[in-house]
Image (tube, rainbow, N blue to C red):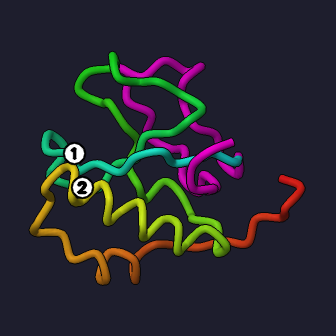
Amino acid sequence: MQGVRCICIDDKGKPLEIPQNKWVKQDELYHITHIFIMKQQNNIQGVELAEFDISECVPYNCYRLTRFAIDVEDLKKFVEMLKRCDDLNQFSDIDILELTKKIQTVEIPETA
């Protein structure tokens, strides 16, 4: 599967607009495919997952980044994705180095 491997570390507080069958589950493996700034949610970072399409769950078109821990092995890949998405979305006010210091990481076994 393509994307940056991550584990859900916070599945609490599901918005009503997102159906249960598209909601993340604690300790489950997912793959980040894009990173956003969620302007309608106080400019926090959000991620799009390969496993779910919630683009029609307005105003929630992605999941909050802090719900996930990034696989240690994919941290470099995550930073590269963040840089690409920064260029595409013209975040410009995002300090990528500072953001990566705040990212939680986890070791995900190759068999997961």
Displayed quadrant of residue 101: bottom left
25 over 92 or under it: above or below: above
> Viewer-proximal residue, 65 or 91?
91
In the picture, the disc for residue 44 is 2
Q: Amino acid at mark 1?
A: Met
* Position of residue 53 measured from the top left corner of the image (x, y, whole percent): 47, 24
Mark 1 crowdedness (10 Å alpha carbons): few <14, some 14-19, many ≥20: some
Does residue 10 belong to the magenta stretch? yes
Provide the residue designation for mark 1: 38
Displayed quadrant of residue 90: bottom left
48 over 59 or under it: above or below: below
* Position of residue 96 measured from the top left corner of the image (x, y, whole percent): 28, 75
Residue pictured at 43% horizontal, 40% vertical? 48
Is 25 placed left or right of 99 in the picture? right
Q: CA distance from mark 2 to mark 1?
A: 5 Å
Does residue 22 belong to the magenta stretch? yes
Is 28 placed left or right of 70 in the picture? right
Residue pictured at 51% horizontal, 39% vertical? 49
The kind of secondary structure element at disc 1 is strand
Q: Which residues are magenta?
A: 1-28
Q: Mark 2 and mark 1 in contact? Answer it, CB < 8 Å.
A: yes
> Viewer-proximal residue, 23 or 47?
47
Q: Main secondary structure of the magenta part?
A: loop
88 over 50 or under it: above or below: below
Residue pictured at 31% horizontal, 66% vertical? 83
The kind of secondary structure element at disc 2 is strand
In the picture, the disc for residue 63 is none
Q: How many marks?
A: 2
Residue pictured at 42% horizontal, 67% vertical? 80
* Position of residue 62 measured from the top left corner of the image (x, y, whole percent): 37, 37
* Position of residue 15 measured from the top left corner of the image (x, y, whole percent): 37, 30
